[in-house]
Structures are given as C-alpha cells and as structure tokens.
Image (cartoon, grey):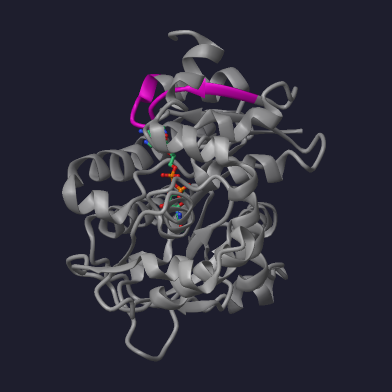
Amino acid sequence: MRNMLVTGGAGFIGSNFILEALKDQGKYNIINLDILSYAGNLENLTSVEEHPDYHFEKGDVCDKETITALLQKYNIEKVVHFAAESHVDRSIETPEIFLKTNVLGTFTLLECARQYWSQLPEGYQNKTFLHVSTDEVYGSLGEIGLFTEETSYKPNSPYSASKAASDHLARSYVHTYGFPVLVTNCSNNYGPFQFPEKLIPLLINNILNNKPLPVYGEGKNIRDWLYVRDHCRAILCVLENGNIGEQYNIGGHNEWTNIDIVRLICKYMDEQLKLPESKSSSNLITYVKDRPGHDLRYAIDATKIKRELGWVPSETFETGIQKTINWYLENKEWLSHTTNGSYQNYYKEMYGNR
Ligand SMILES: NC(=O)c1ccc[n+]([C@@H]2O[C@H](COP(=O)([O-])OP(=O)(O)OC[C@H]3O[C@@H](n4cnc5c(N)ncnc54)[C@H](O)[C@@H]3O)[C@@H](O)[C@H]2O)c1
C-alpha cells in the first residue's frame, strides 16, 4: 500500500479525487492535508471519515515544519498537490494570497519532499510528486487552435500567473535535482462538491433560489469542460503510468460558450423542477459587466494522455451535466450549508479546536 499525501483534499477536485482513489481497496493510504479555507469542506468526505485508509490533518502547505513532520510520520511516497487559491475573480480582488498559497506553498512542498526523500537510503525510488495545474497558464486562444503541452505559457490573471509560476518551479526541480515530478494541466471542471461561486453550481443554486443568473459580457467566452471524476481518473492514470518529468494536458473536447451553458442548465432545471415556459429559469439570465482581462477561449488538446496512457473521459457534457444537476438537487443540504457558511463548523464538531 502506498502512503499518499493529498493537499487541498477538502476542496472540490481534491475531495472527488480521494473518493475515487479509495475505490481501489488497499492501494493507497491517504493523508489529506488541508487548511480548510472558505473553499475546503470536510462534509465532502463524510462517506470516508471512518475509512481505515483515510486520515485528515489540518495544516498549511506553506508551513515547512508541518509538512516535514507529515512526510516523516506517514512515510509518504506519493504527493498529489491540489491545494491552491483557485477562483479567478478572487485573484483579481486579492492577489497576494494567491501568490502565497500557490507559489510559496508549492515551493515549500517541493522543497520539503526533496529534502525528505533525498536522504532516504532508496532516494527517489517509487516516489512521485504530482502537481495539479490548469490550462489557464497558456493564456487565451483565438477562434481556432488548441493548447498542447508545447504551447508557451502566457497567463493573464493573477490566478493563472501564480499557477504558471508553480508549474515552472515544479519543472525546475526535475531539471535541477532529478526530482520525480509530474505536472497535469486540465480544463474547467464541473461536478459534485463544487463551491457555488463557480459558474455551474452558482447557476443551479441561483435557479433554486430564484436569483439572477449573471453572465459576463455577452456570454461569448468559450471554456472546455470536463466532468470532475474524469479529471480524477486522469490524475490517477498519470500518477501510476506517467513518465517522470513530463507534463500532460487533460480535457474532454467539450467547448461551450458561457451563454450556451447557461441555456442548457436552464433547460434541464426547468425539466427537473417542472417549470412552465412562462416561469422558465432562463428569465433570470442577467448580463453583467465583463471580468477585466477575461480570456476569450480555452481548449485543450488531450492527444498525449490518450495516446501514451490510454485515458479517455467517460462522460460527455450532456451526461455529466445531468449527473451534476441531479447531485445538487439531491444534496440541497450540502448546498445550503456551503452557501450559508455553516459547513465551517463541521470541522470543530468533528475534531474540536486543534
Ligand atoms: N476547478 C477547476 O476547474 C480546475 C481546473 C484545472 C486545475 N485546477 C487546479 O486543481 C486544484 C484544485 O482546484 P479546486 O477547484 O478543487 O479548488 P478549491 O478551491 O475547491 O479547493 C482548494 C482546497 O485547497 C485548500 N487550501 C487552500 N489554501 C491552502 C493552504 N495554504 N494549505 C492547505 N490547503 C489549502 C482549501 O481549503 C481547499 O480545500 C487547484 O490547484 C487548481 O488550480 C482546478
């Protein structure tokens, strides 16, 4: 059994990843390190709370002592690094925390793992550090073309710039120290447990609460969408079969304009909620001032991971979005805890004040 440190495992993708990885009985012993920021929610993991191969540790990826102690305590062999500040709009308002968590946090984790692993008798053998990143590091595309692993980095927001910096650090550790790093760059994710400030859960939640559905500019921006569990399976695939030192793009060839997504969700929500045409949720669509520096289009070329590692997504956007809507409708309590902040008491109830 491999001891795996997952950072940011109480967030959207991290918690889905832990649930996915634990499906493979006896393969991984998972230690989830999370600071439980506004985006971290332990309610995502209630189903595995008592699992013998799952352990939660509250802590900061920027804290060298905490990380070194965890690496030693659990004899960590695999690190999967999700922890980050992840919301572009917040990075425009408060960029500093993005630099700290995303750049300094990644550096601290890399450096602690390098120091710990390099002094072991077996060195880097069987060790892997997988850094989870985004397609936003590549900047914006015009109407044609796709991001490949060779596309040069041109980040446009403080969020994507901080992720680009962390990718460069990870890469430098391979070349400077021969450190066993893998980097994945994925397109926009959607699915269960996503904090409802991000587009898709925000739309679902606002429709349920009869609130406006904000659309930036004319809604023409294009994003490439992937169901979160497909992303998690891709990360496991790269972790287990990827070539050390390499980078893998992950995406589902699912390009949608924002306005088309809003319309699709309105259509499915109207069906689910049995709303008559006169009361259609599309009446709630409200165009708002565009985000500054809003990238026009992202689209991933995922040929490399498909060809070399055999990963393919299992959901189309239509099937994934229906699953996602059903999940939020069946988990209204989670949605209400998350939107009213009461989920943050959950940690205290479970673990006290440590
Ligand atoms: N959401 C997407 O569409 C997407 C796409 C591609 C890549 N990514 C990347 O995947 C990763 C996870 O994204 P997400 O959407 O799940 O984010 P999220 O915001 O939902 O979760 C981030 C988690 O990190 C934790 N965290 C924040 N600061 C921390 C710190 N200093 N120490 C320890 N934990 C800390 C938070 O508490 C939270 O649980 C990020 O690195 C992000 O850049 C996200």
Residue at 70 percent across and 31 percent down: it is 47
Q: Is residue 258 visible?
A: yes
x, y (%) of residue 8? Answer: 47, 37
Determine if the magenta segment contains residue 63: yes
Determine if the magenta segment contains residue 163: no
x, y (%) of residue 211? Answer: 36, 54
Residue at 33 percent across and 31 percent down: it is 62
Q: Is residue 148 visible?
A: no
Between 70 and 280, which is closer to the camera in this rendering?
280
User: Bounds of the magenta span?
Assistant: 55-65
Between 224 and 146, which is closer to the camera in this rendering?
224
x, y (%) of residue 278? Answer: 47, 72
Q: Is residue 215 above or below residue 347?
A: below
Left or right of 211 on screen, residue 287: left
Q: Is residue 291 above or below residue 328?
A: below
Between 320 and 77, which is closer to the camera in this rendering?
320
Task: Give residue 251's quadrant in the image.
Answer: bottom right
Total number of numbered labels? 0
Between 131 and 128, which is closer to the camera in this rendering?
131
x, y (%) of residue 185? Answer: 47, 63
Q: Which quadrant of the figure shows ligand 1?
A: top left
Q: Quadrant of the N terminus?
A: top right
Residue at 61 percent across and 45 percent down: it is 16
Residue at 31 percent across and 39 percent down: it is 101
Q: Quadrant of the C terminus?
A: top left
Residue that protrudes farthest toward the bottom in the picture = 144
